[in-house]
Amino acid sequence: MQALLISLFLSFSIWIMSGCGYHPYRATAIPCEMKTLILDTEDPYGPLATTMYEALRSHGIRVITRENKNIKLSSLRLQKEDITRNTLSIFSDGKTSEYSIRMTILIQVVIPNKGIYPITSTISRSFFDHPYAPLAKDTEQHIIINDMRIQAVENLIRQFSNIYYTADNAVTNFYNN
């Protein structure tokens, strides 16, 4: 009787979770064709490239180097990371008290026989300026920018997996018409 109640409870909870749209974190569906990628970047040891390497590996994507130009694999080209700061508020003495930090990352997804697809991710955060604690301010800003970079890269990975399906449908529709 107890086993029946436990199995009934588990079945009911699984049914409820699947019906309400609950999805576990990092449930991005990566197509099989994109499980191995080439990462093209000018700065392979820079913060953006290392963050992208780590995120791709955590999603189960194998990153290889382009040693042979004839390899027909999809590739990610890291184009640009742009960080801008805008003043949001000032102290009574005219010094800036709060900034808005905006990070924009631009990449291109190159899918063989399907095309080149640009993807952009923009993240914004506010940052309070502490004029009497310059070391703490610099450390806090560095942490915020790293968190923004991680969030933007996760957003880009979700977008490029969607682009693969869009590109696949576009090529299929092109050849069917």
Image: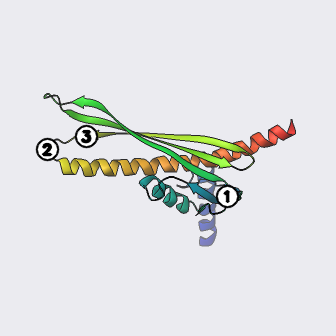
Q: At 43% from the left edge and 55% from the top edge, which residue is drawn?
A: 46
Q: At 62% from the left edge and 60% from the top edge, which residue is drawn?
A: 66
Q: How many marks?
A: 3
Q: Position of residue 76 (x, y in %)?
A: 59, 51
Q: Nearer the viewer, mark 1 or mark 3?
A: 1
The label shown at residue 128 is 3
Q: Residue 56 occupies which quadrant of the picture?
A: bottom right
Task: Decide which of tag 1 and tag 3 comes sooner along the chain.
Answer: 1
Q: Residue 89 occupies which quadrant of the picture?
A: top left
Amino acid beneath label 1: Lys
Q: Position of residue 140 (x, y in %)?
A: 27, 49
Mark 2: few/some/many CA within 10 Å (<14, 14-19, 20+): few
Amino acid beneath label 2: Tyr
Q: At 57% from the left edge and 41% from the top edge, which residue is drawn?
A: 119
Q: Which residue is mark 1?
A: 69
Task: Decide which of tag 2 and tag 1 comes sooner along the chain.
Answer: 1
Q: Which residue is mark 2?
A: 132
Left or right: 177 as drawn, with respect to 46: right
Q: Residue 167 occupies which quadrant of the picture?
A: top right
The label shown at residue 61 is none
In the picture, the quarter occupied by the C terminus is top right
Mark 1: few/some/many CA within 10 Å (<14, 14-19, 20+): few
- The secondary element bearing badge 3 is classed as strand
